Amino acid sequence: MDYHFLIVRGELSTQDLVEWDMSECNSGVIAEKETSDLHLRSVDLNLLTVFDAVMQMQNITRAASFLGMSQPAVSNAVARLKLMFNDELFVRCGRGIQPTVRARQLFGPVRQALQLVQNELPGAEFEPFTSERVFSIAICSPLDLRLGAKLINHMKEIAPQTHLKIKSYITNNIDSQLRYQEVEFVIGYDCFESAEFKSVALFEDELVLVVAKKHPRIGKNITPEQILSEQHAVVSLDIFNSFSKPYYIEEAMQRVVVQQCTDLYSVLSMVSNTDMIAIVPAWLAQQQVEALQLRFIPFPCNENKVTCYVSWHESAERDKGHQWMKVMLGQSDMPE
């Protein structure tokens, strides 16, 4: 209808037009809200717990066992989930299943929503002194030598019934392990680039150069030119999350590498028995200087510090036990 024509003829005032438009607008909002509410009410929210379990287990049979459901019931729920989200969600891969991109996008928000509900149920509070929960933490080498025992002993004092599983061998699927809660936290000198992962800095470590105590050419200091003229021992540059790799990106540094070891302790052992040099954290050099007859000298580089991070997946952030553990890991007195 041409409302402006009616105003000109005097049959409809401007105020009438405003009230008419507001009435139509409100009717539209109410209708839209009712449609949205009706759509949500038509959804079986129990399907979300099935989605969460299947995402974690990556296997229909294991998800069914975890949920206490039959395999056909879980398969039926997955079929309904596919219709709900208008996506395949899971595709067969060997003896298991692989989530689609859409399923990966949904996992974080769905898990957080379920955790919000879980947090409000009776008995949902996390009590560290009585909880028997198992926490799984990956600590990248060489930080496992520095933090592993200290973490275990600290947990025994403040949460004696909890269990701490620590792994120090980090593989290239650590992001997947975090995403599906196989590992809850990763402590290392790197943080994850993807926005689905969260990180906070714990502390900074100073880097030094270690040499044998009776090294024939190196005194109390070393120049960048000398560094490039000496032979180096490193943690294998092919190992995922190698401690040494960030310092040997340039071709000139790669050319001086003559020994690649499995870990930094092996690197130090090699340095103590040869004229090789190595880049290591100062705390590790201080630990081994007497036992291995080493010396350490300042690393002549502007970036001679490295940050240690604790990282986790966003889907775990609503979990109260996870929140408590994150605070515990972030305590400033944890490192020596």
Image (cartoon, rainbow, N blue to C red):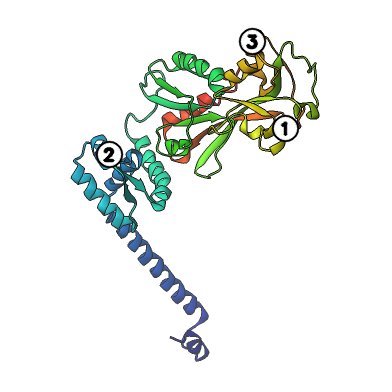
Q: Which residue is drawn at 52% across and 16% down?
A: 150
| In the rendered image, the vertical position of residue 201 relative to residue 77, given as above or below | above
**Nearer to the camera, 292 or 161:** 292
Measured as percent of width and height from the top left, residue 330 is found at 55, 26
**The N terminus, quarter of image:** bottom left
Q: In which quarter of the image is residue 38?
A: bottom left
Dot 2, crowdedness within 10 Å: few (<14), some or many (≥20)? many
Mark 2 or mark 1, earlier in chain: 2
**Amino acid at the residue labelled 3:** Leu
Q: Can residue 195 be seen in this view?
A: yes
**Whole-number angstrom distance, CA of label 1 to CA of label 3:** 27 Å
Q: Which of marks 2 and 3 is in front?
A: 3
| In the rendered image, the vertical position of residue 8 relative to residue 105, given as above or below | below
Dot 2 falls on a residue whose secondary structure is helix
**Nearer to the camera, 112 or 88:** 88
Q: Which of marks 2 and 1 is in front?
A: 1
Residue that carries the numbered disc 1 in the rendered image: 303
Dot 3, crowdedness within 10 Å: few (<14), some or many (≥20)? some
Q: Are circles 2 and 3 on residues that touch, CB within 8 Å?
A: no
Q: In which quarter of the image is residue 262?
A: top right
**The C terminus, quarter of image:** top right
Q: Which residue is drawn at 40% across and 35% down?
A: 181
**Amino acid at the residue labelled 1:** Glu
**Nearer to the camera, 31 or 39:** 39
Q: Going by the image, does 230 lie left or right of 238?
A: right
Task: Please state the total of marks drawn on the protein image.
Answer: 3
Measured as percent of width and height from the top left, residue 49 is found at 30, 43
Q: Going by the image, does 104 lie left or right of 78?
A: right
Dot 3 falls on a residue whose secondary structure is loop
Residue that carries the numbered disc 2 in the rendered image: 63
Dot 1 falls on a residue whose secondary structure is loop
Measured as percent of width and height from the top left, residue 47 is found at 28, 47
